[in-house]
Image: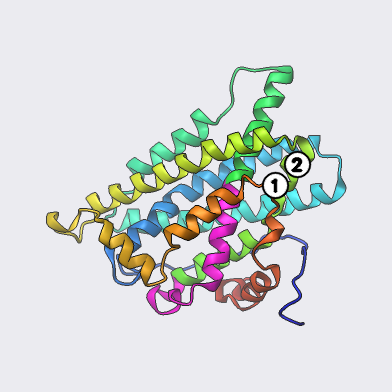
Amino acid sequence: MDPKIDIDKVALSARDVSWDWSGLPMHYFDESPFATHFANGMNMLLPEGEIFFVDIFRRALPFVVDETVREDVIGFIGQEATHSSAHQSLVDHFQNTGLDMEPFVSDVRELFHKMLGDRDLTGRRAHAWLIERVAVVAAIEHFTSYLGDFALNATAWDDALSPRVLDLFRWHLAEEVEHRHVAFDLFTHLDGNYFHRVRAWMLAAPTLALMWGRGTRHLMAVDPELANEQRAIRFRDFRRTWRKGLLPSPFSLTKMFFQYFRPGYHPSQYGSTTQAVGYLATSPAARAAL
């Protein structure tokens, strides 16, 4: 296939992947506590976040009348459930080896299940709250698909990440690119209101950034391998990490943030399904699951 020609969509299905984390070093990302715990900040958000996505999309499914959207949502649900369990395995590994993630994970659980959970609503108000949460998922998926595109092209990851974690991240983020259209298409199908879309992004983006930062600080504070003077997070650590190509640059993140405000925005306008499917065909864990 000509690499310049991208596949628009593929049939979505969950891949029964697993990893053995025994022997994984505490600082698996560039041998850097900051880079590792920045990555772990997202690891701690994902299991509960993905469960929330699955629950909301299952609730929305009865309202879907377009068969193509329905099939995509069902595939999305399967993939997101697998993402949750895969990242939970890594969280459990570190929890069991002395890195206490549970206090922050508890805060994440409260965010998704209390602040964004069910309310005592009925009728139109209950449906409106469901649509609001679908919009939040679509907004977060804008970021995860952006991160997926970054991960598939981050050649600096090849030598900086432990091979098992590299495969976990790239497998997950390739699937984010593969299904990047689904949440936005579901929101558009059920509502599509521009104001609702922007409002959800303005809620989701700063909340995600705040929680990710809090998670990183928490892990630096409880890392059993760090001395007290090594626990501070310094701007130069972040700058060094993005200059190495291990994290997106502030310019790239800012551009991504404003993309979602474009009236004609659609996730299919960036990222490559061909590239994502290509990685998934070679992922060690995905191949082992065949």
**Residue drawn at the location 80% of the way across and 51% of the way down:** 71
- Residue 235 in which image quadrant: bottom left
Report the disc number at residue 184: 1
**Screen quadrant of the N terminus:** bottom right
Image coords of residue 129 (percent x, y): 65, 26
> What amino acid type should be assigned to the residue bearing mark 1?
Phe
Dominant SS of magenta comes to helix
Callout 1: helix, strand or loop? Answer: helix
**What residue is shown with label 2?**
188
The answer to whether mark 1 and mark 2 are in CB contact below 8 A is yes
Taking depth in this image into account, of 92 and 193 the one nearest to the observer is 193
The answer to whether residue 268 is magenta is no
Residue 148: which quarter of the image? bottom right
Q: In this view, does 210 lie above or below 199?
A: below
Expressed as whole percent of the image width and height from the top left, the position of residue 264 reads 72, 49
Q: For the residue labelled by badge 2, is the local secondary structure a helix, a strand or a loop? A: helix
- At label 2, which amino acid type do we have? Thr
Give the distance between the C-alpha atoms of the residues marked 1 and 2, in whole angstroms.
6 Å
Task: Determine which quarter of the picture holds residue 157.
Answer: bottom left
